[in-house]
Image (cartoon, rainbow, N blue to C red):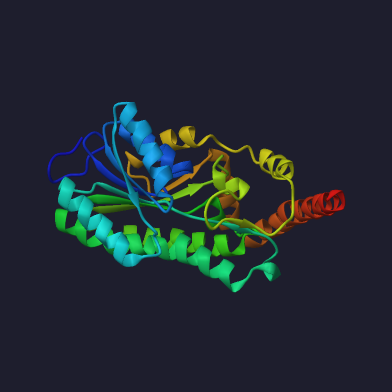
Amino acid sequence: MGGKNAIRTYEGAVCVITGGGSGIGRSLGTALAARGAHVVLADYNERAAQSVAQEIAQAGGSAQPALLDVRDADAFKQLIDSVKRERGRIDYLFNNAGIGVCGPIEEFTAEHWTSVIDIDLMGVVNGIRAIVPVMLEQGFGHIVNTSSADGLTPIPLVSSYTASKFGVFGLTLSLRTELFSRGVRATALCPGVIRTPLLYNEGHGNDVLFDLPRETYDKAWARLRPMDPDKFAQKVLKKLARNASVIIEPAWWRMGWWLFRLSPDLTMWFNRKFVLETTLKEFRAAEAEHKAQK
């Protein structure tokens, strides 16, 4: 469990979760609270964070919502300092907030690139800058940065997302290497396809550059067997308790990482053949049909 000067797993722990109002962040917050942790649900959508906090409280857990735009470094630091002052410690920071843009790279605007990099990568950087001094001072802590399976292998049609998530993955392992001997842990969380609002272009900042009906996305994502976010959170917390450096779930997504490390060229051929060509052909056909019906 851990005492005053040691990390708690998870009873009595204090956990800050960005993107805590929906998806993976919501499921992690609920699972942590069920294990006796106090969770701070930080989100750009304050109403969503409040709703999750209320659900946790009604179930007998301890949670509080917080409004946070992870792009605002000063606001991030103010939140961390406030939680430390009120609770006396911070055991975990889950840098989880993220958005995505899907489409051909030539159609990405400067705003698409900026928004994804600022939230998905620089938002993590802002969290690290805010939390590391706190954790070093208290002598313990665990930073969990949400990368992605797209941060392990080169996936087409999500170029800005892939770039940011590769950055988060490398940053996290660098952080773990540097701070491990000083009592601060770091883990790269690499979800495969999880059934969250991000899949369907829901939520602030997400965008899909195809004019498609919802059923087309459902069909495409169904092939990749999306995991329920609550199930995902349960698996993640078990591995975090063992201080895993990299967590990839669902398990079958690990094959992509193994293949990429074995042969980058083979991986890129596979992704061109079975991801890019198949998906793009399907999307363009559905897009043409959808436009014809309007």
Tell me: 173 left or right of 136.
right
Residue 98 appearing in the image: yes
Q: Is residue 139 above or below residue 250?
A: below
Total tally of numbered discs in the picture: 0
Quadrant containing the N terminus in the rendered view? top left
Q: Residue at x 40, y 62 (%)?
A: 123
Compare residues 281 and 242 and report the one nearer the observer.
281
Furthest-left residue in view? Answer: 4
Q: Give the x, y percent position of residue 90.
A: 23, 49
Q: Residue at x 57, y 70 (%)?
A: 111
Q: Give the x, y percent position of residue 220.
A: 71, 44
Furthest-top residue in view? Answer: 59
Tell me: 254 left or right of 269.
left
Q: Give the x, y percent position of residue 243.
A: 33, 44
Q: Residue at x 22, y 39 (%)?
A: 8
Furthest-right residue in view? Answer: 292
Residue 237 appearing in the image: no
Q: Give the x, y percent position of residue 234.
A: 42, 33
Tell me: 232 left or right of 110.
left
Tell me: 225 left or right of 28.
right
Q: Is residue 115 above or below residue 58?
A: below
